[in-house]
Image: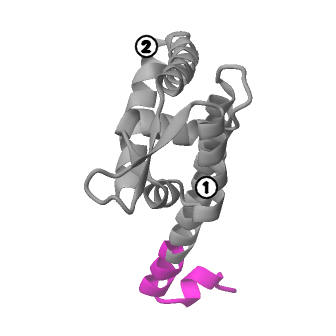
C-alpha cells in the first residue's frame, strides 16, 4: 500500500508546513487589504479635493491657504516642511497667493530677518468656503448611509487614525 505525503512526514513537520501556508496566505491577504485601503483612501482624497469653490487656485495653493487660515502666520520653511515640498516650489505657491490677494508677507516680530506669510481676510474667507464645501459633500454622503454602515466607518476611521499615528 502506498502512503500519502502527509503520512510519510512527522506530524510536527506537516503542522509547520500548514502554519507556513497560513502565514503566507495571511501575508497575501494583508497585502491585498493594504492595496484596497491605499486605493480607497487615494480615491476618497482625490474626490474630496475636487470639492472646492470655483476659481484659479490649484490644490497646492488651496492647501497652503487652508494651513495659514488654520494655524496662523508661517515661514516659507515651515510651509515647505509641512507640505513636503522644496522651498522653491513653496515660494511659487505663496507668490501666487500673495499676488491674488489671499496672503500677505510680513516681518516676524521676534526675528526681523524672517518673513511670515498670513492669510488675508479674503484668503480666510476662501479657505473657510472650501472647508465648508468639502465638509458638506462628505456629510451628505455619510448621512445617505445606514446607521450600521456609519458605525463601520467610525470604527474603520479609528483604526486608520491609529495606523497613521503609529
Question: Which residue is under mark 1?
Answer: 91
Per the image, the residue denoted by label 2 is 147
Of callouts 2 and 1, which one flags the residue occurring earlier in the amino acid sequence?
1
Q: Is residue 165 left or right of residue 19?
A: left
| Horizontal and vertical percent position of residue 101 | 59, 30
When asked about the image quadrant of residue 106, the answer is top left
Asked whether, in this view, residue 12 is left or right of residue 60, the answer is left
* Location of the C terminus (image quadrant): bottom left
Percent from the top left, x then y, of residue 103? 53, 36
In depth, the one of 138 and 28 nearer the eye is 138
Of 105 and 15, the residue lying toward us: 105
Residue occupying the point 44% across, 39% down? 118
Residue 133: horizontal and vertical position, in percent? 57, 17
Is residue 7 magenta-colored?
yes
The location of residue 134, given as percent across then percent down, is: 56, 22
Residue lying farthest to the left in this orientation: 110
Q: Is residue 46 above or below residue 2?
A: above
In the picture, the quarter occupied by the N terminus is bottom right
* Chief secondary structure of the magenta portion: helix
Does 141 sit above or below residue 80?
A: above
User: Does the rendering let one see residue 86?
Assistant: no
* Residue 91 picture quarter: bottom right
Point 42% across, 84% down: residue? 12
Q: Residue at x 39, y 23 (%)?
A: 151
Can the viewer see residue 123?
A: yes
Eye-nearest disc, 2 or 1: 1
**Chain part drawn in magenta:** 2-19
Tag 2 secondary structure? helix
Residue 77 in magenta stretch: no
Amino acid at each position: 500500500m502506498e502512503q500519502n505525503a502527509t503520512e510519510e512526514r512527522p506530524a510536527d513537520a506537516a503542522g509547520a508546513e500548514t502554519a507556513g501556508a497560513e502565514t503566507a496566505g495571511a501575508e497575501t491577504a494583508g497585502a491585498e487589504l493594504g492595496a484596497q485601503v491605499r486605493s480607497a483612501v487615494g480615491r476618497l482624497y482625490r474626490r474630496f479635493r475636487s470639492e472646492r469653490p470655483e476659481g484659479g487656485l490649484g490644490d497646492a495653493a488651496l492647501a497652503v491657504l487652508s494651513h495659514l487660515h488654520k494655524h496662523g502666520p508661517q515661514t516659507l520653511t515651515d510651509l515647505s516642511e509641512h507640505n513636503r515640498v522644496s522651498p522653491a516650489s513653496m515660494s511659487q505657491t505663496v507668490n501666487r497667493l500673495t499676488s491674488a490677494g489671499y496672503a500677505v508677507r510680513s516681518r516676524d516680530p521676534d526675528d526681523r530677518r524672517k518673513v511670515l506669510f498670513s492669510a488675508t481676510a479674503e484668503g480666510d474667507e476662501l479657505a473657510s468656503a472650501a472647508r465648508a464645501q468639502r465638509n458638506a459633500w462628505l456629510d451628505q454622503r455619510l448621512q445617505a448611509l445606514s446607521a450600521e454602515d456609519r458605525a463601520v466607518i467610525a470604527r474603520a476611521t479609528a483604526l486608520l487614525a491609529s495606523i497613521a499615528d503609529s
